[in-house]
Amino acid sequence: MGEEPLLEMRDVTLRYGTRQVFSGLNLRVQPGQVVGILGQNGAGKTTLLKSVLGDVKPANGIIFRQDTAKISYLPQHGRFPKSVQIRGRDVVYLGLDGAKLGFWSSAGARDKVERALALVGAQSYADVPISGLSGGELQRLRIAAAIVERPDLLLVDEPLASLDLKHQADIVKIFDNLSSQGTAILLVTHELNPVEKLLDTVVYIALGRAAVGSVPEVMSSETLSALYGEEVRVVNLGGTYFVVGAQNGTDSGFVEEALHGHHHASHFESAESPHNPKEAGH
């Protein structure tokens, strides 16, 4: 008998209001696994995370969470405008269980914060006011706050959004390190390429359905055609996935033209429905 998963979703159907997000989802997440959650804007990726947190109840099916597992959630948008006069390490302190501003003097709290700062490589600017930090530096601190209590399962929503390539690579290295230490990660992203090598499993949500498997299994013409309910083609051009309607063909020449604005193509994981394909912008 295998190791008990941190998270298991059995035949889960989620709804957002009257709209079905997906149905019949089966997913098991073991320690150290990284699961990418893909789909166009509004598909229900964040709703899936909220169901794991218990904020959204499944319409059908069961969601099991290991009783002793610590779960931490890093939403897409930060809590602090840069005008707030706190230091980098203060952001991390606020991730402690029961943290209150000014009650951080215990040695245990300091040790946890220093460890988290070290894990994300943020010690050099830990005492800098956040108003003086870049977006990538602030994102490292937000991740440190999310992991300061050593969660078993980390839920992260669009952690690479608005970051340049260097900071994206830095964040990916942090997640790789966390995974190697046994932290499981559920990662909502529209930036598939930077995280592809991290992913053990992909959940792709579209049109009220979901496909689950490895990146090659899910990012295939056969799988996405079944998901969208009509024929689409997946092209991997230079390591970037494109989803195009069958009427436009599948050769790399078409995708090259799409990149230069001559045709419309859906850009890898943020693919729009083939009924109205467009290059994904975010």
Image (cartoon, grey):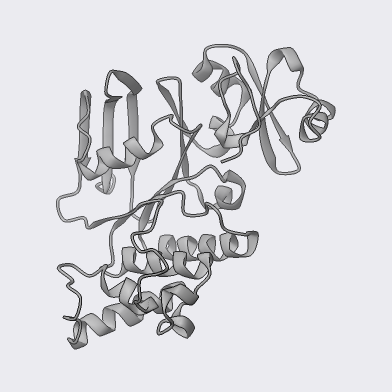
Viewer-closest of 202 and 102 = 102
Q: Position of residue 127 (x, y in %)?
A: 40, 85
Viewer-closest of 261 and 23 = 261
Q: Position of residue 136 (x, y in %)?
A: 52, 66
Q: Position of residue 45 (x, y in %)?
A: 40, 36
Is residue 61 depicted above or below 120 in this figure? above
Q: Can residue 1 be seen in the rendering of this structure? A: no
Which residue of the protein is positioned furthest toward the front in this rendering?
A: 83
Residue 278, quarter of picture: top right
In-image side of 239 versus 256 (left or right): left
Q: Residue at x 50, y 73 (%)?
A: 133
Q: Total marks drawn?
A: 0
In-image side of 151 versus 103 (left or right): right
Q: Could you tell me which quadrant the C terminus lies in?
A: top right
Q: Residue at x 46, y 49 (%)?
A: 158
Residue 162, quarter of picture: bottom right
Q: Position of residue 248 (x, y in %)?
A: 75, 17
Is residue 113 depicted above or below 200 in this figure? below
Viewer-closest of 263 and 80 = 80
Residue 56, quarter of picture: top left
Q: Could you tell me which quadrant the N terminus lies in?
A: top left
Is residue 117 depicted above or below 71 in this figure? below
Is residue 129 depicted above or below 151 in this figure? below
Q: Can residue 41 be seen in the rendering of this structure? A: yes
